[in-house]
Image: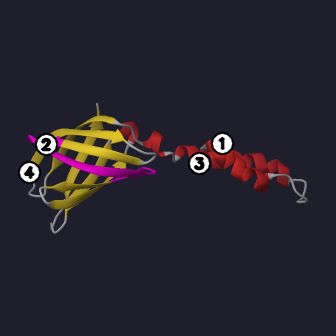
Amino acid sequence: MLRRLALALAPALAPSRAPAQAPALAPALALALLTAFAAAAPAAAQRSGLYDVTGIALDGSEYRGTLELQQVGVASFRIAWSIGGETIEGVGAVSGLTFATAFTVGDQPGMAIYEIRPGGVLEGHWTIIGAFTTGREVARPR
């Protein structure tokens, strides 16, 4: 992917009839763009695996369980929470340092938004459609 980006940028960064300083700036600009692109790559921001989960439910009660992430695309994941003997399945997508999910609890759709913290820790808020509050959750990789 980085190679394709470099090839796409090559014509724009090639020396032209611009002032003598422009070609010297081209390699620095290319390096800066490639570094920024690599830093934002989803695979580097999140990983598949098992996570320990703690949270506060919509009713204010505390819960514990596990979360399993399985990467199924460049930025997409299958998700399965195991909490209190119940399995909740969903999907997620990562963009930069944000991980968004959609899931179903019983017959009610829900969603969560997490910040990806150092070490791959997920901290976020979740809710189900029609709720008047949000829950909080932290998932730590094992």
Place residue 16 in its image quadrant: bottom right
Residues drawn in magenta: 82-100
Residue 87 magenta = yes
Under circle 1, the secondary element is helix
Residue bearing mark 3:
36
Under circle 3, the secondary element is helix
Place residue 130 in its image quadrant: bottom left
Q: Residue at image x 59%, y 44%?
A: 1
Residue 69 magenta = no
Indicate which label's residue lies in the foreground, 2 or 1. 1
Q: Are the residues at dot 2 and dot 1 in contact (C-beta closer than 8 Å)? A: no
Which amino acid is tagged 3? Ala
Q: Which badge, 1 or 3, is on the more N-terminal residue?
A: 1
Q: Which badge, 2 or 4, is on the more N-terminal residue?
A: 4
Q: CA distance from mark 1 to mark 3?
A: 14 Å
Question: Where residue 9 appears, x then y in whole percent?
Answer: 71, 52
As drawn, is 83 to the left or to the right of 48?
left
Label 3 CA crowd tier, 10 Å (few <14, some 14–19, many 20+): few
Q: Residue at image x 23%, y 54%?
A: 103
- Residue closer to the observer: 12 or 52: 12
Which amino acid is tagged 4? Ser
Q: Which badge, 1 or 4, is on the more N-terminal residue?
A: 1
Residue bearing mark 4:
61
Q: CA distance from mark 2 to mark 3?
A: 37 Å
- Residue closer to the observer: 90 or 142: 90
Which amino acid is tagged 2? Ile
Q: Are the residues at dot 2 and dot 4 in contact (C-beta closer than 8 Å)? A: no
Residue bearing mark 2:
83
Which amino acid is tagged 1? Arg
Under circle 4, the secondary element is loop
Label 4 CA crowd tier, 10 Å (few <14, some 14–19, many 20+): few
